[in-house]
Image (spheres, grey):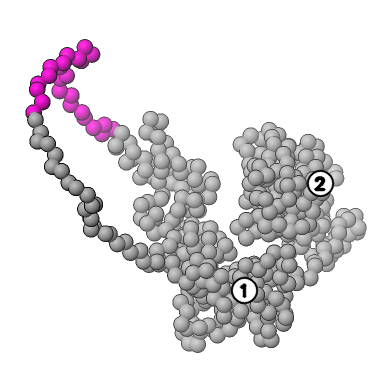
Amino acid sequence: MAFSFVQTVVLAVLSLQASALKIWDTPAALGTAIPAGCRAALTTNITCPAKLVTAAEIVNEVPQNETFLEQFCEATCRSSLQTFATLVNTHCGNTVYSFGNSTKQSGNDIAVPLLWAQNVACLEDSTAQSLCLPSITNHTAKACDDCTLKYLAGLLNSTYGHRRVSEDSFSALASSCSVAPTAYPHGTVTFPPPPASTSNSSAPCLGTEYTAAEGDTCESIAQANNVAYYRLLSDNGIDLKCESLTVGTKLCVGDSCTLHTVQTPTIFPRITTFHTADPTLPQIAANETCKDILAGKDFTITELLAWNPIIHRNCDNLATLVGHTICVSPPGSGDWDIPITVTYNETWTVPPGDWVALPSATEASNVTRTDPYAFGSIGTVTATANETYSSLGASRITDCPVKDQDIEDGFEWALLPEDCSSSMEPYCTPFLDEPAPPSTTFASSCLPSVIMGW
């Protein structure tokens, strides 16, 4: 289940007091492809303080503010989140919908991880009756402590924590602690088989239908049809390793584009994991950045990300795409650099008809009028530029880490993380009537060079 997506959409508020949180602001924000009842359930108010703890935070042992955690585990918040999960299960269930940006998941994929995360976050020590999570995240809990065993059992009770602990390792730990594993009950995780890669009969193919033949791989099919590798997988519900592709599988092949192969540079021959690379294709080194791809191109990072949803918005995952293809032109077009020619017609044709000369002009007689509202004489006014305002603006933007050259190189303000954007605003777009903020430096994660991988 894709709980990382949920982490990006949970809204936070500044106050620790219980307030109404929402995953999405309004049903309209979800689009009409999702049924109205499901949209209404996903936009239900959740009465909890500040934010929702995500499954990723639990698995990665992210520390939580203890005051927040106590309020998060109160009956009001727990009941509200349970109600939200119940509504989502009733009206959305396990049916998979598209949530935009190539994200496809069910309502339960969103609600269940949040409910599970709260259950683990609110575990209590049986003796001290105190919350367990602080001792887990600050690593003060001992191996045989009640909190440790409850936390590990909680991880085993989900698909989210199976990579952190196995059934065998938990049983071994319980045995070394002279505790029966049954004292900490949990379910055993089972995993469904890879999804069958059959075309969706309810959604007509908007491209070309193709039937996989003997010897075909996802890479070879994408290459032969000039389609980005990951777009082929996404459009047909194929797993990332292409293990579910079998002979006879019917695929929908979308619009072609100009391809760019992501590949570790070698001298000769150039071989990828899947096939012998075509040396006529433009190649990309494993350490290449989005800036390198954009160099000399007329498109910007906005277009590159739109054509390739697999690329992260801060371009930090290009190395993971080695051996596969991305689009460097719009799907459906082989070229983005479209020349524009403008032709001007300066020929003017005299319309037909009889032309008569205008009568000669006569000079009008002088007329004197008195304006009863006229002001007296106006003296000379000398305007002096406000050098103080000019110097104030210049001094403040010197601390702004985003320079004109960064914008010219393809960086966009929309790529800034939300916390960076809010903290940089007084320095990059200052209000000169307000007190000047103190000189400062920003975290490296806010710098265009880091975000763009320059």
Residue 50 makes an appearance in the image: yes
Residue 371 screen position, x and y as percent: 20, 15
Residue plotted at (66% across, 39% down) = 50
Q: What amino acid does circle 2 point to? A: Thr
Q: Which mark is residue 86?
A: 2
Q: Nearer the viewer, residue 226 or 289?
A: 226
Secondary structure of the residue carrying numbered label 2 = helix
Residue 284 screen position, x and y as percent: 48, 74
Q: CA distance from mark 2 to mark 1?
A: 41 Å
Please state, as top left, top right, bottom left or bottom right, where the C terminus lies in the image. bottom left
Q: What amino acid does circle 1 point to? A: Thr
Q: Specify whether 320 is left or right of 362.
A: right
Of the image marks 2 and 1, the number of the one nearer the N terminus? 2
Q: Nearer the viewer, residue 380 or 241?
A: 380
Whether 364 is among the magenta residues is yes
Q: Nearer the viewer, residue 138 or 259?
A: 259
Q: Which mark is residue 208?
A: 1
Residue 146 screen position, x and y as percent: 83, 51
Whether 431 is among the magenta residues is no
Secondary structure of the residue carrying numbered label 1 = strand
Q: Specify whether 28 is left or right of 186.
A: left
Q: Where does the magenta region start and end?
A: 363-388
**Do the CB atoms of the residues marked 2 and 1 lie less than 8 Å apart?**
no
Please state, as top left, top right, bottom left or bottom right, where the N terminus lies in the image. bottom right
Q: Specify few, some or many for label 2: CA neighbours under 10 Å numbering under 14, 14-19, or 20 or more.
A: some
Residue plotted at (77% across, 44% down) = 84
438 up-or-down from 101: above or below: above
143 up-or-down from 53: above or below: below
